[in-house]
Image (cartoon, rainbow, N blue to C red):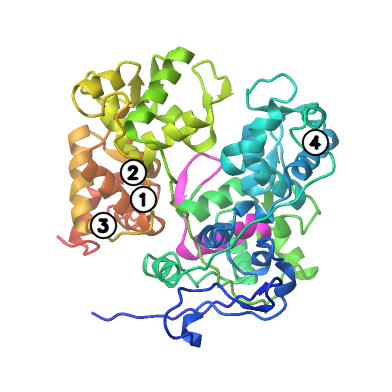
């Protein structure tokens, strides 16, 4: 067996105006202070003036890192990721002007999140359009810290939290002092990024210096569109390819894309979809979330991209820190009281995840409302570590795992010892959730194949979709073709994680073993054929 070790050197310069001495990512200092301790070094003075002594991290903007990596660096250096974002009042004014300019009386929390994540907005007419960078930054400010600013602003007029931001909320928020009328500032304090932070990212596979250049990515995607007769490729399809390595066509069929196409899609969606936005407007100047076949040639003609542009050496990273959560007993009390207060007899695993992720809950009537911060944190506790607590508590009454938490489950969990009784703190959770690409604690490919094969046979699932595999990997639950949700054993969830790790590498190799096709469906016979052809060990 051979191995290849690649050393990656990334340099950054940080100016410290308060002390006038050279800065860096300040790796952990030892007795010697040699250059090897500055393994993330300096990129020169061109970034120095972008960083002031108040902890602003705007110097990161010019570096070839995806947004998630920049957030990782900010977190490790105790920089609030908001340090690149506008103040509350500035963001509020920007969004209010955006609503007025586009005649949006009510802007939903879903639209705000879409703008924050992608830089696009889908209107009530179903049309998608690009928003300016300052609007996207303002949306990111609204959705940061569990949507803190959105929650404050949306209730300024009527005191209600219904996930809708009205045009009049801005003026009322100014009047009641929620925000100031003239903008504000931000500040922060930084600490060093230690050696182990960087090395951990390398060893866990989060560093990938193989992204194609903009020209190469654009050429690859253009050829992909031609090969598959995709006249218009949507921003949603591009994101799907970047995230999963699959593409769902307009006929609803899902198929695998080549690795180079997935890498190209990642380049398109890096840095808030920067390349996608540049390319899609090359022909008609419009930003409608649609990339046309002709955009590539026009982008070459007008100089948007060049044949000699440099490859992207950025890397992807998914922050997995779940934060400091309440204890199990405290979380159980909070959710139990929440269900009783809201008359929610059965709370689904999907609702719990929605609350944990957004701080909002959609009830059985389709109405969305904000939940208190302590409820969101309790929901996070329930969903932490592969929804470990949810699985434990939901089965306390009936012994079944159907993805539904009843109001009596917590009390029965206390009686059988699954939970501590009232007032006893069973310790807060400071753990991390699963990192999708870290396979060190997962079963081998052959073991995972055996587990999933047996699972399919036991449940009578002839074809297991890539979406179901992802659901099992993420939540430990599976929704069948009848719409019923059930919990899967831990070994099945771990096997699903193995299938979906590294851009679903194993899923792609196994699903095609029988027919040679990649349709996002794993049959019960695929694993056996994969053993026969040597794809996996017997």
Give the mark nearest the N terminus, 4 or 3.
4
Secondary element at tag 4: helix
Q: Which mark is residue 434?
A: 1
Give 413 or 355, whichever is nearer the viewer.
413
Q: Residues within 10 Å of mark 2 (few under 14, many from 20)?
A: some
Spatial CA distance of label 2 from label 1 is 7 Å
Task: Give the number of the mark in front: 2 or 3.
Answer: 2
Give the mark nearest the N terminus, 2 or 1.
2
Spatial CA distance of label 2 from label 3 is 14 Å
Residue range of the region highlighted in magenta in the rendering: 248-274
Residue 479 vs 233, above or below: the answer is above
Q: How many numbered discs, if any?
A: 4
Residue carrying label 3: 441
Secondary element at tag 3: loop
Spatial CA distance of label 4 from label 3 is 48 Å
Q: Residue at x 80, y 68 (%)?
A: 302
Give 170 or 77, whichever is nearer the viewer.
77
Q: Does the magenta-highlighted stretch encompass residue 30?
A: no
Residue carrying label 4: 96
Q: Which mark is residue 385?
A: 2
Secondary element at tag 2: helix
Residue 517, x across and y down, in percent: 37, 53
Residues at circles 4 and 2 in contact by the CB criterion of under 8 Å = no
Residues at circles 2 and 1 in contact by the CB criterion of under 8 Å = yes
Quarter of the rendering occupied by the N terminus: bottom left
């Amino acid at each position: 067996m051979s191995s290849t070790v690649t050393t990656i050197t990334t340099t950054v310069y940080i100016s410290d105006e308060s002390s006038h001495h050279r800065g860096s990512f300040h790796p952990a200092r030892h007795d010697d202070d040699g250059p090897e301790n500055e393994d993330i070094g300096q990129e020169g003075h061109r970034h120095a003036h972008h960083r002031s002594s108040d902890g602003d991290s705007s110097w990161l903007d010019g570096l070839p890192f995806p947004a998630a990596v920049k957030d990782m660096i900010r977190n490790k250096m105790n920089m609030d990721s908001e340090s690149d974002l506008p103040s509350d009042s500035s963001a509020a004014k920007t969004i209010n002007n955006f609503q007025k300019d586009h005649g949006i009386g009510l802007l939903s929390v879903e639209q705000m999140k879409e703008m924050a994540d992608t830089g696009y907005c889908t209107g009530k007419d179903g049309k998608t359009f690009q928003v300016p960078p300052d609007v996207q930054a303002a949306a990111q400010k609204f959705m940061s810290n569990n949507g803190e600013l959105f929650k404050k602003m949306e209730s300024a007029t009527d005191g209600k939290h219904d996930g809708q931001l009205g045009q009049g909320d801005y003026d009322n928020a100014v009047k009641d002092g929620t925000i100031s009328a003239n903008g504000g500032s931000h500040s922060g304090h930084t600490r060093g990024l230690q050696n182990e932070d960087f090395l951990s990212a390398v060893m866990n596979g989060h560093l990938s210096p193989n992204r194609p250049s903009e020209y190469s990515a654009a050429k690859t995607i253009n050829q992909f569109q031609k090969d598959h007769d995709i006249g218009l490729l949507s921003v949603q399809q591009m994101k799907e390819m970047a995230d999963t390595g699959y593409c769902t066509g307009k006929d609803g069929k899902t198929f695998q894309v080549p690795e180079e196409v997935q890498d190209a899609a990642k380049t398109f969606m890096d840095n808030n979809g920067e390349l996608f936005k540049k390319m899609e407007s090359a022909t008609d100047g419009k930003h409608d979330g649609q990339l046309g076949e002709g955009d590539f040639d026009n982008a070459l003609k007008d100089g948007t991209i060049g044949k000699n542009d440099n490859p992207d050496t950025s890397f992807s990273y998914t922050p997995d820190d779940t934060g400091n959560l309440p204890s199990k007993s405290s979380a159980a009390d909070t959710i139990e009281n929440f269900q009783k207060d809201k008359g929610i007899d059965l709370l689904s695993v999907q609702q719990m995840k929605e609350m944990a992720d957004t701080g909002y809950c959609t009830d059985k009537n389709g109405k969305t409302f904000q939940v208190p911060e302590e409820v969101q944190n309790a929901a996070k506790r329930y969903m932490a570590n592969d929804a470990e607590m949810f699985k434990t508590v939901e089965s306390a009454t009936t012994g079944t795992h159907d993805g539904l938490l009843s109001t009596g489950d917590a009390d029965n969990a206390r009686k059988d010892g699954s939970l501590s009784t009232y007032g006893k703190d069973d310790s807060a959770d400071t753990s991390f959730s699963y990192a999708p690409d870290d396979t060190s604690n997962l079963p081998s490919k052959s073991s995972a194949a055996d587990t999933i094969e047996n699972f399919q046979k036991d449940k009578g699932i002839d074809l297991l979709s890539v979406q179901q595999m992802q659901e099992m990997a993420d939540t430990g639950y599976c929704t069948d073709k009848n719409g019923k949700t059930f919990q899967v054993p831990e070994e099945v969830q771990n096997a699903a994680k193995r299938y979906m790790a590294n851009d679903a590498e194993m899923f792609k190799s196994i699903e095609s073993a029988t027919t040679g096709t990649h349709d996002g469906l794993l049959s019960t016979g695929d694993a056996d054929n994969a053993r026969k052809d040597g794809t996996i060990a017997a």
